[in-house]
Image (tube, rainbow, N blue to C red):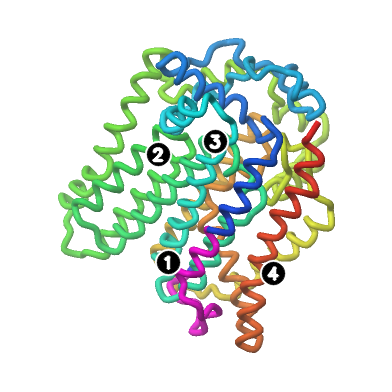
Amino acid sequence: MKDEVGARAPLRTAPYAVLAGIILAYLVIAAQYAIRTPAWQVPDEPAHYNYVRYVVERRSLPVLQPGDYDQAFNERFTDPANTPDLPIDPMRYEFHQPPLYYLLAAPVYALTGGNLVALRLVSVLLGGALIAVSFFAAREACPQRLDLALGAAALVAFVPQHVAMMAGVNNDSLAELLLALALLQTIRVLKGGTRRGFITLGMLLGLGFITKTTNYLAAPVALVALLFSRRTSPSTDSAGLVLRSAFVFVPAVVIGSVWWLRNLSVYGGFDVLGLARHNAVVVGQPLTADWIARLGVGPFLLSALTTTFHSFWGQFGWMGVPMPDGVYLGLGALSVIALLGWLSTLRPGQASRASLLLALLTLSTFAAYAWYNLTFVQHQGRYLFPALIPLGLVFSIGIDRWTRLLPRRFGIVVYAGVFATLAALDLYALYRFVVPSLSG
């Protein structure tokens, strides 16, 4: 993740035409996932759907209550053989989530009579916008290498598990879009911001706060960018830094406080995010301590890492439909090749401030994932998707590093072919594994 990795650009075609092609390919593939994936076979989809339905039918926001989570019922429901015959009404455990996604989805629910595919397509469109923003954020980080920005956008577009999630009813699509917008604006502010730019960043942070808790990861990244910006503008004194911080965090807090105060009124105590209520309600969810006691530390960690890797790339349905071992072996080899290529480009003292922000977001995402898994067994790689933009840049830099050793035209074909292969894998996974295995 450096400003410039090399002089050769593997893609000679106009970059925005390539970006449009990536987004179009994603929309075609993701729409097929939205239409062809059997109902309720995206993780937590019934609970998110019930939130939208509650907003439309009750004209208010739900409150998470004891009894909204039933582990035994969930285990029965997530078996594809049982899903068509079971009601979704008992699945209300997402009622603690911030409301913005559900408020935006509510008009679509009302206009279509709650049509599941229509709601899924809302997420698909948000995913298309995410790809575009991912390109611009990566371009800000590597302004001299638009081919790397295209590679990062293509990884966001074509990771099979990510496509599957973007084609479901959940708040991930909006949350990732707002996080990407905040990241883009943060990098721009780092390079020199105006009052409007700082306020815009604050509003994006605030909108993220009322969308999903993962978006709180953007706040420390923005704070570090403000500290870096003082070095970019040496004339900025402490008072100026405080003023800039106020322009960012006052709008963010004002927007977020509407949700926090509401939670204090319904959940009490200091439960501003509703997470204490959530942890009290999800009785029966597998606990990490129990698994370690049963398996031992070594086998537990091996299982956790393996499942995380598999489910990052694609373990579909409610984690019940993996791909063949050979596919994961190939993806693992590709990941190692990309990582080694990226590591070979690193030079001491040459990391840009933008790359440090991307690294901070990545480390924060992995730390939050590890922290959550200290209590609950949630080895789902999709929880690492908030870091997909920096991971996409690392991946594209690493692949580019090796393709630059090849003859120019052949290198271009190989570089583009890696991402085209991922797009083909999306369709292969959908029609070879997802549809046959989840149709009940």
Amino acid type of the residue tagged 1 in the rendering: Arg
| Callout 2–callout 4 Cβ contact below 8 Å | no
259 in magenta = no
Q: Give me the disc on residue 118.
A: 3
Q: Residue at left 45%, top 63%?
A: 138
| Callout 2–callout 1 Cβ contact below 8 Å | no
Task: For the C terminus, give its image quadrant.
Answer: top right
- Image coordinates of residue 414 in percent, x first then y, are 67, 76
Q: Is residue 121 left or right of residue 426?
A: left
Q: In this view, does 71 lie to the left or right of 235?
A: right
- Image coordinates of residue 317 in percent, x first then y, are 72, 37
Q: Give me the disc on residue 208.
A: 2
Amino acid type of the residue tagged 2 in the rendering: Gly
Q: Which residue is identified by label 4? A: 337
Q: Which of marks 1 and 4 is nearer the N terminus?
A: 1
Q: Residue at left 46%, top 25%?
A: 110
Using the numbered discs, state the Cα–Cα distance from disc 1 to disc 3 in whole angstroms.
Answer: 32 Å
Choose mark 4 or mark 3, whichever is in front: 3
Residue 257 versus residue 438 in the image, above or below: above
Choose mark 1 or mark 4, whichever is in front: 1
* Magenta part of the chain: 2-23
Question: Among all residues in the image, which is located at the extreme front?
Answer: 112
